[in-house]
Image: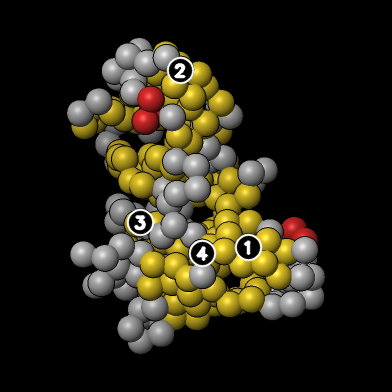
Amino acid sequence: GQNIDQPTEMTATEGAIVQINCTYQTSGFNGLFWYQQHAGEAPTFLSYNVLDGLEEKGRFSSFLSRSKGYSYLLLKELQMKDSASYLCAASPGAGSYQLTFGKGTKLSVIP
Amino acid sequence: KAGVTQTPRYLIKTRGQQVTLSCSPISGHRSVSWYQQTPGQGLQFLFEYFSETQRNKGNFPGRFSGRQFSNSRSEMNVSTLELGDSALYLCASSLDWTGGNIQYFGAGTRLSVL
């Protein structure tokens, strides 16, 4: 089975740094995705981690520890437009064709 | 390059009716997945199609079905609608389904069952 946990809501101040955590327990695991979803819009791809460690893409970074079943998304220099839900999703091992999503973390950026 | 297109964007139905939702994937993408999104459960996998074959199905009742056409366009059907079927239905396409292929989502169809 698959189980993915992430905080329901977070609030952070414009210009600050915020870390959104995600823990997973899966019967098979290939890698971990992060998506951003603004209210009423489609989820959009942010990152995909397969190997342990930190991957940086501009203001966004994502980290994975396979041994701990843990990932985080780090957002720096927060902007108001970063207010959105952030979804982590586990990609299973070979033979399965579905992503398992966490319920999402709603981030509110305040002035 | 056009993104994933879902039609219609909004639907209102009554209990007991059936509904068909449509998804046109990104050109060249052969894998189409469908998800149901609700505030309480988040995104839940419905099924995935590749080359007109359903390769995986989530834990949903048989009232939920789908198909894929030779041009990779996909439809999903929900029969005998229930109030609990009210949700955002999202379609995602990818080149193929291997572990690292990015899924690109459409804007979804918001279904309200009255």
Chain identifier of the residue bearing label 2 in the image: A
Q: Is residue A67 left or right of residue B66?
A: left
Give the label on residue B111, or none.
1
Give amino acid for label 2. Answer: Ile
Tell me the SS state at disc 2. strand
Q: Residues within 10 Å of mark 4 (few under 14, many from 20)?
A: some
Tell me the SS state at disc 4. loop
User: Disc 3 vs disc 1: Cβ atoms closer than 8 Å?
Assistant: no
Chain identifier of the residue bearing label 3 in the image: B
User: Disc 1 vs disc 2: Cβ atoms closer than 8 Å?
Assistant: no
Write down the residue under mark 2: A110
Q: Position of residue B87 (x, y in %)?
A: 63, 56
User: Disc 4 vs disc 1: Cβ atoms closer than 8 Å?
Assistant: no
User: Disc 4 vs disc 3: Cβ atoms closer than 8 Å?
Assistant: no
Tell me the SS state at disc 1. strand
Q: Position of residue B8 (x, y in %)?
A: 51, 70
Closest to the observer, A81 or A60: A81
Which residue does the image show at 30% across and 62% down from the upper left?
Answer: B3
Q: Is residue A78 left or right of residue A88?
A: left
Chain identifier of the residue bearing label 1 in the image: B
Write down the residue under mark 4: B9
Task: Give me the C-alpha separation between circle 2 and circle 4.
Answer: 31 Å
Chain identifier of the residue bearing label 4 in the image: B
Which of discs 3 and 1 lies nearer the camera? The answer is 1
Task: Give me the C-alpha separation between circle 3 and circle 2.
Answer: 30 Å
Q: Tell me which numbered mark, 4 or 3, is placed earlier along the sequence.
A: 4
Which residue does the image show at 26% across and 65% down from the upper left?
Answer: B2
Give the label on residue B103, or none.
3
Task: Give me the C-alpha separation between circle 1 and circle 2.
Answer: 32 Å
Same chain assignment for discs 3 and 1? yes
Q: In this view, does A59 lie to the left or right of A4?
A: left
Q: Position of residue A55 (x, y in %)?
A: 23, 30
